[in-house]
Amino acid sequence: MVEVLANQMGEFFPEIKKQQVLVTNVIREEEASFLRTLEQGLQLLDTVIAETNGKEVSGAKAFELYDTFGFPKDLTALILKEKGYSFDEKEFEAELQKQKARSRAASEVSTEDWSVLIPGNVETFVGYDQTENEVKITRIRKVDSKKDGVLYQIVLDATPFYPEGGGQVGDRGVLVSANETIEIIDTKKENNLILHIAKQLPENVNAAFVAKVNTKFKNCFFKESLRYAFDAFGFAYYFRNTCGAKRIIGKPKLFAF
C-alpha cells in the first residue's frame, strides 16, 4: 500500500518517498497493536458471556467493549446474536450519554475576544509553495479549556502554515523574531481565519517574525492521528461457523504520518 502510494503521489508529496520505510514500519506496528487490542476485546466478551445469567448481557459491559476497545454496538450485537445472546440496549445508551456528558464537561472552552493588532482583512495564505515567510501578527486571543488548559490563537498576515482540514492535519512549526522563538503546536481554521495555536504569546506581539513550518509534519494525508489509526468497523471478527472462515481481519483505514 505504501509503495503504491509513494509511486503515485511521490511527485506531489516527496515526504512519502523519503519516509517510505518509516511509514511502512509504523503501519506494521500499529496493525500488530490493533490485533492485540482485538484479542483482548474478544477475550473480555467471552468472559462477560460466561459470567452472564440468562441470555441478556449487561449494557454497561457492552459499552465497556465500545469505550475501551472500540467495538461498535452493531458488531457486539452481531457476535452475541450468533452465540444466542443479546444485550441491554437501554443500559448501553444510558452509559453512552454519561460518557458524552463527561466529554462535554472536559471540553468546555472559554474564549476571549480578539485583540486586533492590524485592522482589516489583511490575512493571506502562502503555504502552497512556501514553508517559510516573513510575517506580522494581525490578531491574538486567549483560549482556556479544561482539556488543554490555557492556549493562545495567533493570526498572521501571510502564513505558510496549512490548517487542519481536507484530510490534512494542521501544520506545526515556529515563529522566530530577533529575540525569541514561539512554538506553534497546531494550526486550525475558523471563520476564514487561520489560527496558529501556541502555549505562549511573544513578549513583543508587534515585532516582525519569520514563520517556519516544521516540514517533518508537513503533508499529512489523513485527519486522524496514529491513536485513531483504525476505524472501529475494521475490527477483526471471529466467524466460527460461517463459510469455514475463522476470522476476518480489518485493514488500517485512517492513518497520519
Image (tube, rainbow, N blue to C red):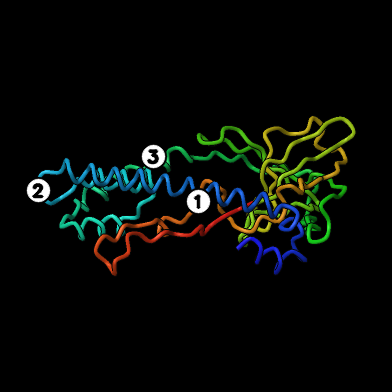
Q: Which residue is mark 2?
A: 54
Foreground: 192 or 225?
Answer: 225
Residue 119 relative to residue 57: left or right: right
Report the mark closest to the observer, 3 or 1: 1
Q: Is residue 3 above or below residue 142?
A: below
Q: Confirm whether residue 75 shows in the render.
A: yes
Q: CA distance from mark 2 to mark 3?
A: 32 Å
Callout 3 amino acid: Arg
Q: Badge 1: few (under 14), some or many (20 or more) residues near its Cα, within 10 Å?
A: some
Disc on the earlier residue, 2 or 3: 2
Evaluate whether residue 193 shows in this view. Answer: no
Q: Residue furthest left?
A: 54
- Measure the alpha-carbon separation of dots 1 and 2: 36 Å
Of mark 3 and mark 1, the one earlier in the sequence is 1
In this rendering, which labeled residue sits more in front, label 2 or label 3?
2
| 76 to the left or right of 122 | left
Pointer 3: what residue? 102
Relative depth, front residue between 203 and 218: 218
Task: Answer above or below: position of 217 versus 248.
Answer: above
Q: Name the quarter where the N terminus is drawn.
A: bottom right
Q: Residue furthest front?
A: 244
CB contact under 8 Å: marks 2 and 3: no
Q: Residue at x 49, y 47 (%)?
A: 32
SS at badge 1? helix
Q: Position of residue 145 (x, y in %)?
A: 54, 36
Q: Few, some or many C-alpha atoms within 10 Å of disc 3 (few <14, some 14-19, many ≥20)?
A: few
Read off the residue under disc 1.
31
Q: Is residue 29 left or right of residue 51?
A: right
Q: The residue under label 1 is which amino acid type? A: Glu
Callout 3: SS: helix
Residue lying at 27% horizontally and 67% vertically, measured from the top left: 242
Mark 2 neighbour class, 10 Å CA radius: few under 14, some 14 to 19, many 20 or more: few
